[in-house]
Image: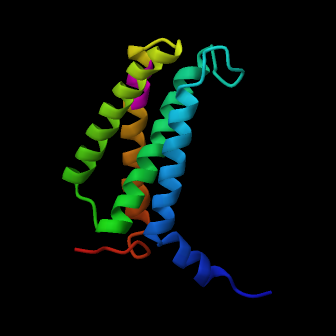
């Protein structure tokens, strides 16, 4: 059996692949948050906040990973801007849901913001654990 680890390593460091994954995920997230309230995949119980938190944590993790692979090492300043962009997007996302018959929720937005912060913190932790494996460009 051939050793696929060099190919896998190159794919994991490919900023083009990460850009595609980020774009597809972000589009899927937008579509999912704008499904009608009656849709069977829209949670109506307390899992809703957990889903908001998790979805935005993953979005933040993908955004930071993609940005670092494409542009180089992200500083706390970059990560702060990433969080601001995600929080503003979350507010816009909540507001536009009202146009498809869903409610705009301040608590959903808070879960999104907290998830984005957690995702960025996870990114920093993973980056620090794998310092030698993630390229550092200046």
Question: Relative to 2, does residue 16 appear above or below in the rendering?
Answer: above
Res 114 quadrant in image: top left
Count the marks. Answer: 0
Magenta-colored stretch includes residue 96: no
Task: Tell me what residue is drawn at x 37 percent, y 62 percent.
Answer: 128
Question: Relative to 103, does residue 56 appear above or below in the rendering?
Answer: below
In the displayed orientation, state which residue is furthest to the right.
1
Q: Which residues are magenta?
A: 108-112
Question: Is residue 54 shown to the viewer in this render?
Answer: no
Question: Is residue 21 shown to the viewer in this render?
Answer: yes
Q: Position of residue 115 (x, y in %)?
A: 43, 35
Task: Tell me what residue is drawn at x 39 percent, y 23 percent.
Answer: 109
Q: Position of residue 104 (x, y in %)?
A: 43, 14
Task: Tell me what residue is drawn at x 35 percent, y 34 percent.
Answer: 89
Q: Position of residue 32 (x, y in %)?
A: 58, 31
Q: Is residue 80 left or right of residue 28?
A: left
Question: Relative to 16, does residue 37 appear above or below in the rendering?
Answer: above
Task: Tell me what residue is drawn at x 47 percent, y 20 percent.
Answer: 97
């Amino acid at each position: 059996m051939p050793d696929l680890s060099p190919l896998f390593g190159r794919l994991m460091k490919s900023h083009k692949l990460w850009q595609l994954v980020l774009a597809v995920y972000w589009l899927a997230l937008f579509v999912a948050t704008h499904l009608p309230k009656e849709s069977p995949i829209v949670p109506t119980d307390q899992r809703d906040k957990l889903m908001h938190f998790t979805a935005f944590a993953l979005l933040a993790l993908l955004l930071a990973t993609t940005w670092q692979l494409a542009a180089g090492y992200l500083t706390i300043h970059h990560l702060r801007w990433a969080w601001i962009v995600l929080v503003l997007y979350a507010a816009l996302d909540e507001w536009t849901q009202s146009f498809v018959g869903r409610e705009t929720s301040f608590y959903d937005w808070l879960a999104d913001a907290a998830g984005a912060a957690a995702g960025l913190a996870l990114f920093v932790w993973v980056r620090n654990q794998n310092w030698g494996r993630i390229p550092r460009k200046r």
